[in-house]
Amino acid sequence: MKASILRKEILSLVVLFVCSLAMSAASPRNYLYDTKEENGKIVSKVIFLQEEGLLNKQVKYEFAYNDNGKVAEKKAYRWNQAKETWDPYYLITYQYNEDGNITSEYGMWDKKKKDYSLNTQKMLVPATNYEEIFS
């Protein structure tokens, strides 16, 4: 009898735990964006997470453009709460091919070398995905 009650209590706790995980996963996060433009082009974007009435810095993007007015470079930074500084995170450079596609090269910040040489990757992106650069 005692074993049966104990099993039911444990099962109830497990169910409550799973439900609480599902609820926290389902709750949407409230992000706010501060976008700066110059001459009609986005030059930076800071993303804040709104929690309990406070705005917490999360990520910052900086954009550089080529002579044709297309994005040539996207740098990302993470907010370092302890130092209160933006730490480099990754860099993506873009080359525009004659066939309309975009060749991108990605590299993460290497603290030791002080450059974007970690986990470098190249990728071919269809021109139709150009707007995704800003996200």
Image (cartoon, helix red, strand yellow):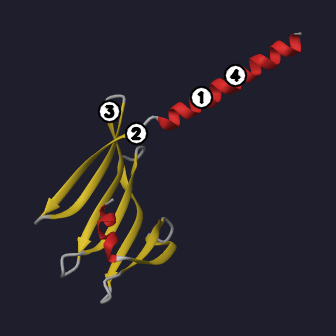
Question: Who's the residue at 75% across and 17% down the image?
Answer: 9
> Nearer the N terminus, badge 2 or badge 4?
4
Q: Circle 2 sits on which residue?
A: 29
Q: How crowded is mark 3: few (under 14 residues within 10 Å), some or many (20 or more)?
A: few
> Nearer the N terminus, badge 3 or badge 4?
4
Q: How far apart are marks 2 and 4 (CA)?
A: 27 Å
Circle 4 SS class: helix
Mark 3: which amino acid?
Leu
- Image position of 106 with respect to 100: above or below: above
**In the drawing, what numbered circle is on residue 4?**
none
Circle 2 SS class: loop
- Image position of 33 with respect to 107: above or below: above
> Nearer the N terminus, badge 4 or badge 1?
4
Q: In this view, does 44 lie to the left or right of 11?
A: left
Q: Residues within 10 Å of mark 2 (few under 14, many from 20)?
A: few
Task: Measuring from the top left, give residue 15's x and y in whole percent.
Answer: 67, 26
Q: How far apart are marks 2 and 3 (CA)?
A: 13 Å
Q: In this view, does 59 lie to the left or right of 11?
A: left
Question: Who's the residue at 22% across and 54% down the image?
Answer: 35
Q: How crowded is mark 1: few (under 14 residues within 10 Å), some or many (20 or more)?
A: few
Q: Which label sits in the foreground, 1 or 2?
A: 1
Q: Distance between the residues labelled 4 and 1?
A: 10 Å
Q: Circle 3 sits on which residue?
A: 54
**In the drawing, what numbered circle is on residue 19?**
1
Circles 4 and 1: CB atoms closer than 8 Å: no
Q: Quarter of the image containing the N terminus?
A: top right
